Image (tube, rainbow, N blue to C red):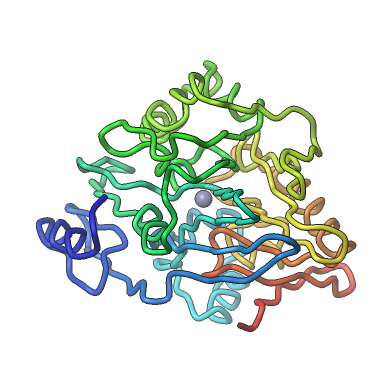
Amino acid sequence: MMNRRELLRNAAVFGCSIPFLGYCSRTSAIETFSLDSDIHKFTIGEFQCTIFRDTMWKYLAKDYFINADEVDLENALSRYNITPDNIPSPFISMLLQRGNEKILIDSGIGFSEEPLVFRGNEYVFKGQVNHLLAKEGINHSDITDVIISHFHPDHIGGIFSGKGNLNFPNAKFHTHQKEWDFWHSPSSENQSPLFKIFVEQNTTPLKDQNLNLINGDFQEIIPGITAVVADGHTPGQIALIIGSDKNQLIYISDAFLHPLHIERLHWQTNYDFDHQKAKQTRIKLLELANENEMMINAFHFEFPGLGNVEKVKENWKWNYLQS
Ligand SMILES: [Zn+2]
């Protein structure tokens, strides 16, 4: 495990600057982000919850909102103080603790030893989930469960180290059967080569581990944690309902990438596998959260991505939780 000083030294090798390197690209403009406030803690039901900010990424409006009306988009982006060429987004990981249980939801992008190519650019990923777990005094071998919402790199990259060692040797791994089947079938052949590499390195070897492949659309996988199929973004993405009764949080993963996808349900993203299913899932999750007064955690929203939704006539409104 590298410490922060070593991480920074490693970053310096690639010409990136402090305070902390989220990621760097050696063939495009270098981006740095301050990750000083990268841990957020709260409780939900019986669980002590910690959200870690793994790193930051920069998305583009042309990928995020592919069918948006130009003028409407421009106005909407300015309300969020963002420009079409820079939509900042965190990658996160969530730790739930209850007695001896230490349950990790998603694992961040990981820490790549070698540059990886994505859309023509070379990247060296510097996810810091493993570093932050250590900083919080959490032993990797004490993690009892790892829940994987779906198989995109920013959610699975931290399961194995760059050298191929399992980072959570005593954990039971949970993911949906449909997600597993898609990525391990010819149907995924046209997916990005980088995505395929991440799947092969971080999920395929789990077949020899304690692996729970979830079946069904709505299933309790650990007492107090229910997996809900949230497909569309990928064929087997799951959302997670955490807690009980009126004290619940729903982890929606990538069903929504930005609050504007809540306000404009018909705006599609390049990152969704099936637009029609993605929209159906969005409506299902909004109704579920609203009816049950759930707090929401959205992986890619402004860190820590906590808030709730309200229905105003036929439209939905996202409210960030004031911390
Ligand atoms: Zn994601």
Residue 68 position by quadrant = bottom right
Tell me: residue 6, above or below residue 314: above
Indicate the position of residue 280 as horizontal and vertical percent values: 78, 46
Left/right of residue 279 with respect to residue 142 in the rendered view: right
Can you name the residue that lies furthest to the top here? 186
| Left or right: residue 221 compared with residue 92 | right
Q: Is residue 35 above or below residue 249?
A: below
The answer to which quarter of the image holds residue 289 is: bottom right
Q: Tell me which residue sits at (47%, 29%) in the image.
A: 203
Q: Is residue 39 left or right of residue 273?
A: left
Which quadrant would the C terminus be assigned to in this image?
bottom right
Q: Nearer the viewer, residue 243 or 304?
A: 243
The answer to whether residue 57 is visible is: no
Q: Is residue 90 visible?
A: yes
- Taking the spot 40% from the left edge, 68% from the top edge, the residue there is 86
* Image quadrant where residue 313 sits: bottom right
- Image position of 178 with respect to 97: above or below: above
User: In the picture shown, does residue 142 fall above or below 17?
Assistant: above
Residue drawn 64% across the image and 67% down it: 260
Residue ranking furthest to the front: 100
- Front residue (pair 161, 171): 171
Please state the horizontal and vertical placement of residue 164, each as a whole percent of the image.
31, 31
- Percent of width and height locating residue 29: 22, 63
Q: Nearer the viewer, residue 48 or 310?
A: 48
Whole-percent x, y for residue 299 in the image: 56, 58
The residue located at (65%, 51%) in the rendering is 255
How many marks are shown on the rendered structure? 0
